[in-house]
Image: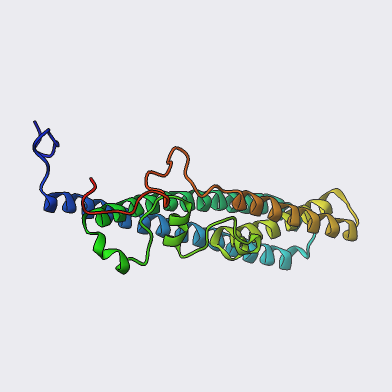
Amino acid sequence: MSPLVDTPGERLPPDLRLQILTTEHWGLLSTRALTWNEAFSRATMFLSALTGSVVALALVAGVTGFARGFVTFALLVLPVVLFAGIGTFRRLIEINREDVRWVVGMNRLRHAYLDAAPELRPYFVTAWTDDEAGIMTTFGARPGPGSFAHEFVTTPGLVAVVNGVVAGVLVAVAGLQIGLAPGTGTVLAVIFGLVTIALLALHQYRFVIRPRGLEPSFPETQPEPSAGRR
């Protein structure tokens, strides 16, 4: 039988238990760093692609003078940019959800630390419960739905606004292609852009803080950690 198995009458030494917990804690910290590096990389890739597309459109416009060649080129490029933007937005949402899961794991580990040494509680500035209040405390935010306007200052919210602008420009160019009046095309572009931003922001706002299948094991309402409880 493995020496790590907790058999009746034989428990792991406290120092070995602490080593296992700290190893898991560092693993979660490393995973959080990797996910946030991916978030920044994905956002940078999207903005770089958008910048290159704008430069290319400007060069084509300078040559064709916004004629049919420019419209055709824009209708080829802008859908690809919009697809990349929506894909980036969705992945950023997933990364945020993954990050919540890692925070839940670290909060549970802190609870185990306080089980072993409850006198250390005054020195913890992050939470040791894995309910919503504990998660938001670790993030340095307030529990509850929060402000809808706050969504637009986050990385996914910024990408959502850029996607709305790209969608509006795409509709305006499509309007030129089918012969709509400039005023009508502009109005449709603004409406479509705002609707796109609103839908993406609503999707982010309704994003559940609690990952599926991960119910609280140590909510705030339970008895406080104590050295005598295992």
Of residues 35 and 47, which is closer to you in this image?
Answer: 35
Q: Quadrant of residue 38?
A: bottom left
Say whether residue 176 is left or right of residue 199: right
Q: Looking at the picture, tell me which residue is in the foreground, 104 or 166.
A: 104
Q: Which residue is rendered at x = 69% and y = 63% of the image? A: 60
Q: Quadrant of the N terminus?
A: top left
Q: Quadrant of the C terminus?
A: top left
Q: Quadrant of residue 66?
A: bottom right
Q: 196 or 143: which is nearer to us?
A: 143
- Is residue 17 at least partly visible in the picture? yes
Is any part of residue 73 visible from this angle? no
Residue 218 appears at what percent x and percent y? 37, 47
Q: Position of residue 75 (x, y in %)?
A: 71, 51
* Residue 170 placement (x, y as % from top left): 73, 54
Q: Residue at x 9, y 36 (%)?
A: 9
- Residue 103 lies left or right of residue 191; in this view the side is left
Q: Position of residue 57 (x, y in %)?
A: 68, 62
Which residue occupies 83% across, 54% down? 188
The way the protein has been coloured in the rendering is rainbow
